Image (cartoon, rainbow, N blue to C red):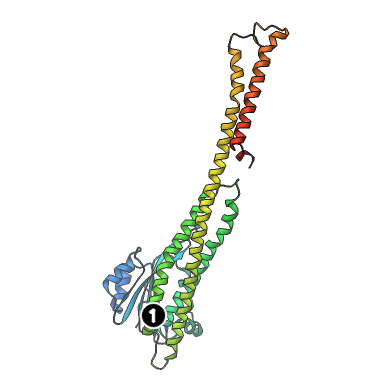
Amino acid sequence: MQLPNQIKGIETAQSEDLLWVYVESPTRDKMNIIANKFPIHELNIEDCLSKNNLPKIDRYEDHIFIIFHFPTVHKDKTSPSFSQLSLFVGKNYLITVHQGDLKPLFELFQLCKSDDPKNKRDIMGRTSGYLLHSIVDVLVDDLLHISMKVIGNLDDVEDDVFDEKISNAKEISLLRREITTLRRIVVPLKRIMSELTSRDVKRFSSIDEMEEEEEDLISYFDDVNDHVSKVLEALDESKETIEIYKDTDFMLSSEKTNRILSFLTILFTLSIPITVLGTFYGMNIDIPGSMNFNSSFYGYLPLFFIILTSIILTSVMVLYFRKLGWMNNLTK
């Protein structure tokens, strides 16, 4: 079964009796050409053209239709987003239709298009089930790489959380969003991979004269499932860790704010006696600096009384604040 390769966005790779049809950025015209050659349902075509479908598996008599989500990291963005990958898996063909940038899939297809028969044999094998495993395996490996990179940022966040000179609330929020995005991709991926392994691998992996390949593919898909499970476990642990960092950062920021407010409040309170002292200069009292000041000993008595009273009141307030523990935070 051949397709016109001159149409931009539709390419094919052939290995023995197996055909891989590669469709990038699908349009209605492209999908109509595919539908004329393969028995695919109109509803599945609509799913391929849409960018916001939930991951799923639709089963038919002669093929299955799968929707996956895989993460992508764009050059102008540090956080991952997801790209939709739709697959039609038949007995002797596999069609991939993807939205967005899936670099590992593109590189894998280019290897299959090369003239090296060993590459085709290693990637495509002789069954659509084998090719499906190769595609999912390379994308899960890329998912593992992206998730480990995001999780690795937790160490940097941990160092910044306990540094009072750095405000990292934004970094924590961005990292929480990245982890949440990856979990939204991995959770349905794990469910679909489990269904494929238990229900569909045997259907598209056996060849009449090669029954052993069926058992090998089940072990291959089990290995991919194990990788997905490890990624999900790591993301769950990271989610709990980042929540702890968020709470810790909030608590330390609140404590820092309380210390500042406590310092300013106590400073204002201790300045009250001095403020009272200054108000005496606005009254009709003979003290140094006033117009009618008497320079004799008795003229200084009001000043001594005001200063002594201010010192006593300030000292009493300091001792009382220390007894209540209000000034302890200022020394931490």
Residue at the spot of label 1: 198
In the shown orientation, is residue 82 left or right of residue 318? left
269 lies above or below 73: above
Q: Residues within 10 Å of mark 1 (few under 14, many from 20)?
A: few
Label 1: which secondary element: helix
216 lies above or below 136: below
User: Is the N terminus in the top left, top right, bottom left or bottom right quadrant?
Assistant: bottom left
277 lies above or below 210: above
Percent x, y for residue 49? 32, 66
Find residue 127 and report its image quarter: bottom left
- The kind of residue on which mark 1 rests is Ser
Pick whichever, 84 or 198, lies toward us: 198
- Name the residue at 44% across, 64% down: 183
Percent x, y for residue 6? 38, 74
Percent x, y for residue 27? 33, 67
55 lies above or below 162: below
Find residue 281 and report its image quarter: top right
In the shown orientation, is residue 298 left or right of residue 13? right
- Name the residue at 73% across, 9% down: 297
In the shown orientation, is residue 62 left or right of residue 177? left
The answer to whether residue 269 of the structure is visible from this angle is yes
- Name the residue at 51% across, 69% down: 144
The answer to whether residue 8 of the structure is visible from this angle is no
